[in-house]
Image (tube, rainbow, N blue to C red):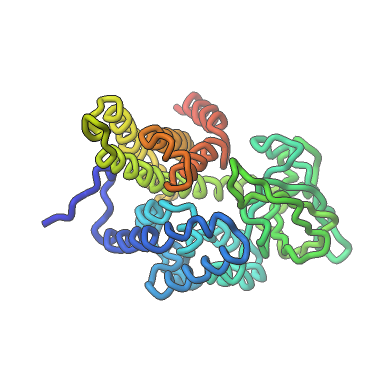
Amino acid sequence: MQPEVPVTAGLPECPSDVRELKDRVADFVRRRVVPQEPALDRGGPDAAAVLRELRHEAKEQGLWALPLPAELGGQGLPLRSYAHIAEAEGASDHGPAALGSASLLDVQMLRRHGSARVRENYPRRLVAAELRSSYAMTEPEVPGTDPFLTQTRAEPAPDGGWTVTGRKWFASGAGDADLVTVLTRTGGAPPDRDGLSLLLVPTDAPGFRVVRELPVLGAGGQWEIALDEVPVPADHLLGEPGKALAIAGERLQLGRTLRCLRWLGQARRAFDLMRERALTRTRSRGPLGDLQLVQHHLFDALLALRTTRPLVYEAVAHLDAGRDAHVEVGLAKVAAARMLQQVADSAIQIHGAAGLGPDTALPGLFRTGRMARILDGPDELHVVSVARRVLRSP
């Protein structure tokens, strides 16, 4: 007998060779990560201790670093397989960190574009969670959608390295990172695109300073940093000078797709809460679910989930095959962000005042949905980018 497929699943179906692993990941997130969300959200030493324990358990259960290269201590799942697991991990914002997949973008970038020294020193330790990393692209004084205006500058140093000066903000995890990849100008002046490079900056270097945490709709994890003549070794340049945007674009394509997969997981969590509320909350005349307006919310949420998921997996298929995926990722990113906000909002509406309080995950899910429409490029950027590509296509 085939196992029952959740009503929210839709197409594509999870492959049989991945289903058992996905179920184990989903169970771990549900039983171990979700109950610890309040402690993890608060941050600080207590959150760090909880995260260490969760990581230890994930390693013990064989769930650690599933998409990371096997030769570095991961399990080497290809994107087409890991995508289904990313949905399960993403049901909680803390799932990827607890299960060791959060370092995927940095590990992949350093392996592909780092010097021999960088490849030797950092990727394996990132996979093992011995080091923490961050990525700093945007700046307070210029639009985040226009990297050509980047003001942070790296000047050649007498020892052959670089001296970096500038300011970055909304850098995820930069407050406790050991390494920060910084988009900086090594030549030219704004808006010249050819002078932009990526430097891997050790945060213990003199002149590196954490300015402040930037709460986003009440949630932590984003940071502003300052670099005041920070020395960076020559071999910590990623790729070639002036080629930052090609590397950043490669990273963003995968990063946006992974976010979409995780948002699918969070939207399903919000939908499940809404459905449960509709079935169990009663009025004097019966369950909430008997009301047509409530049924309308459920239908629209399910429609959004079912129609968004194929778009996300189309982006996965293009990336996995090494094909250009600008249009597919742009469509998926806008659709998934809007979908998560819509589903979380409907779930809150069905819960009433309870959906605004601390007793459900819905406020956090709604916050993520609203942030999703700006993180990794606002909706408007992707709409224009996709439309222009379509107009230029044969």
Residue found at the far left of this picture = 1
Task: Judge whether 88 appears above or below 335 on screen.
Answer: below
Give the residue displayed 69% in from the left and 60% down from the top: 200
User: Looking at this view, is 263 or 118 the one in front?
Assistant: 263
Residue 282 image position (x, y, % from top left): 26, 36
* Residue 335 visible somewhere in the drawing: no
Give the residue displayed 42% in from the left and 38% down from the top: 344
Q: What quarter of the picture does the C terminus occupy?
A: top left
Residue 44 falls left or right of residue 164 = left
Rendering quarter of residue 173: bottom right
Residue 13 image position (x, y, % from top left): 26, 49
User: Looking at this view, is 251 or 369 the one in front?
Assistant: 369
Residue 111 image position (x, y, % from top left): 57, 63
Residue 18 falls left or right of residue 55 = left
* Residue 380 visible somewhere in the drawing: yes
Q: What quarter of the picture does the N terminus occupy?
A: bottom left
Residue 319 image position (x, y, % from top left): 44, 48
Residue 280 falls left or right of residue 217 = left
User: Looking at this view, is 207 or 234 the one in front?
Assistant: 207
User: Looking at this view, is 28 or 204 the one in front?
Assistant: 28
Task: Judge whether 303 appears above or below 10 on screen.
Answer: above
Rendering quarter of residue 160: bottom right
Residue 120 falls left or right of residue 267 = right
